[in-house]
Amino acid sequence: MNKNRYLIIINTMMHQYNSNWLNKFNEVISKRKKILTYRYRQAITNSNARLITFLNKKYINFSSNDYLGLANHPKVISSYQNEAKISGTSTSSSGHIIGYSIKHKILEKKLANLLDYPNAILFNSGFDANQAIISTIIGKNDCVITDRLIHASIISAVIQSSGTFKRFSHNNIISLVKILKTTNKYNNRLIITEGVFSMDGDQSPLNDIMMYAKATNSWVMVDDAHGFGVLGKNGKGSAYLKNCKPEILVITFSKAIGVNGAAVLCKYKILADYLIQCARQLIYSTSLSISQINAIDTAISIMQESNCLRRRLRNNIKRFKNGAKKLGLTLIPSNTAIQSITFNNIEHVLSLVKKARNHGIWLNAIRPPTVPMLSSRIRITLTAMHRKCDIDNLLQLLSLY
Ligand SMILES: Cc1ncc(COP(=O)(O)O)c(C=O)c1O
C-alpha cells in the first residue's frame, strides 16, 4: 500500500474514532440538560464557613463542610504561612522519595495516639485514601459489602477492583445480615459504612455492624469524613463516640479540620506496612506539603480544644431543626450538621436555589446521579460560624416555599 493511501485510511479511522467519542459526549450532555441534571460549576470570589461572595454579592453560605470554621482560623493560616516560608509550597516528591518529612511522621503519630490506633498513614485526600485501601487490599476472592448510600470514592474503587460488590439497604442491619449469610464462601469480607452519611447526615449503626462483622469474621471500614472533628469527646469522631474500633478508619481533614488531606487509621500494623508497600496513591503521588501538614497539625490541636465551637454547632443544628419542625418541613432525619430536604421534582429544587439567591442565601441543588432518582435535594450544611439571624433567614425563605 502506498504511503498516502495508508495515511488516508488511518485519518478516516481516527476521525471515526474521535467522532464516536464526540457523539457519546454530546449524547450524555444533551440528555443531562434535558432532564435537568446537567452539572455546572460557579466561580466564586471567596468563601468561608458563613459567607460566600459571587459576582460581587455576598450570600449566607449553607454549602460549606468547614463545620467549625477552621479553614479561616488565624492560627491555622499563620501555621501554613510560616511553614511555607521555611519549606516552600511543595514537597516536590512522593513520600517514598523525599516527600515524607519529620512533620509528616509526627502528625501520623499524633493522629494514631489521638484515636488510639497503632498506625496512621497520611493521604492527599479522602478520595485518594478510599481508593488506596480498596485497590490495595481487595482481591479476586474478596467481597466488599457497603451501605447503599456509600460515598462515590468507595463505589468507584470497588467497581474497579477484582472483588465482588454487594450493597445492603441504607443503615439496615437485616439487609446486611442477609448478605453476610450468603457470602461466607469468599476469602475475606470488608463491610464499609460512613460514620455520618455525606448526603443524608444520618449516622450508621456502628455497634450492630461491628457485632455482626465480628460474628462472621469480616472486617469493618468506616469513612468518618463528616464525623471527625464534630462528634465524640474532643471531636474524635463517630467510632470513638460509639466506643468501637473498626479495622480501618478513614478521616478527612477537608471537612471539620479545614485543610485538605486525609488519614487512614489501621488496627493492625501489618496493614499499614502493606499500604506503604503497595498503595499506588501513596507511592506515585506528591505528598501533602509541609505547610499543609503544619496547618493540619494546628487545626487538629484547635479542634480538640474547641468544645465551645462544637456546642455552637449543636445549638445551630437545634435552632434549624426546631424551626423546620414548626414550619412543618420534612427533613431527612439527622442530628448532624447535614440537613437535607428532598423533592421528587428537580424543577422545585432548582427554583428554590434561585429564590434563595434572591434572598442572599447560598444553597446547592444535589441531583441524580449524585443521589438516587426522585431524591433530588437541598443539602443544607450548618456550621459553628452561622449566626442565629442566618438560620432565621434561611427558615424564613423555606417558609415561603
Ligand atoms: C464520606 C466522604 N468520604 C470521602 C470524601 C472525599 O474526601 P476529600 O474531599 O478529602 O477527597 C468525601 C467528600 O466529599 C465524603 O463526603
Image (cartoon, helix red, strand yellow):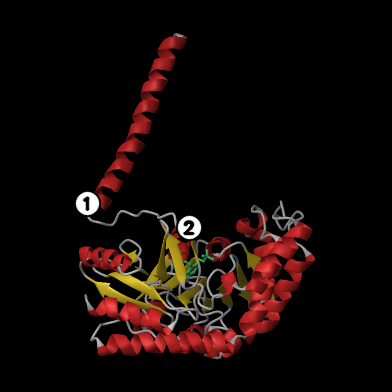
Where residue 4 sits: x, y (%)?
A: 43, 10
**Amino acid type of the residue that numbered disc 2 sits on in the rendered structure:** Thr
Where residue 21 sits: x, y (%)?
A: 35, 38
Mark 2 vs 1, N-terminal side: 1
Quarter of the figure with the C terminus: bottom left
Where residue 215 sits: x, y (%)?
A: 49, 87
Mark pair 2, 1: CA separation: 30 Å
**Amino acid type of the residue that numbered disc 1 sits on in the rendered structure:** Lys
Mark 2, Cα crowd under 10 Å, few <14 / some 14-19 / many 20+, is few
Where residue 171 sits: x, y (%)?
A: 38, 81
Residue 382 visible in the shown view: yes
Ligand 1 has an atom within 8 Å of the beta carbon of the residue at disc 1? no
Q: Can you identify the residue that label 1 sits on?
A: 34
The residue lying at 62 percent from left, 60 percent from top is 279
SS state under label 1 = helix
Mark 1, Cα crowd under 10 Å, few <14 / some 14-19 / many 20+, is few
Ligand 1 has an atom within 8 Å of the beta carbon of the residue at disc 2? no
Quarter of the figure with the N terminus: top left
Q: Can you identify the residue that label 2 sits on?
A: 45
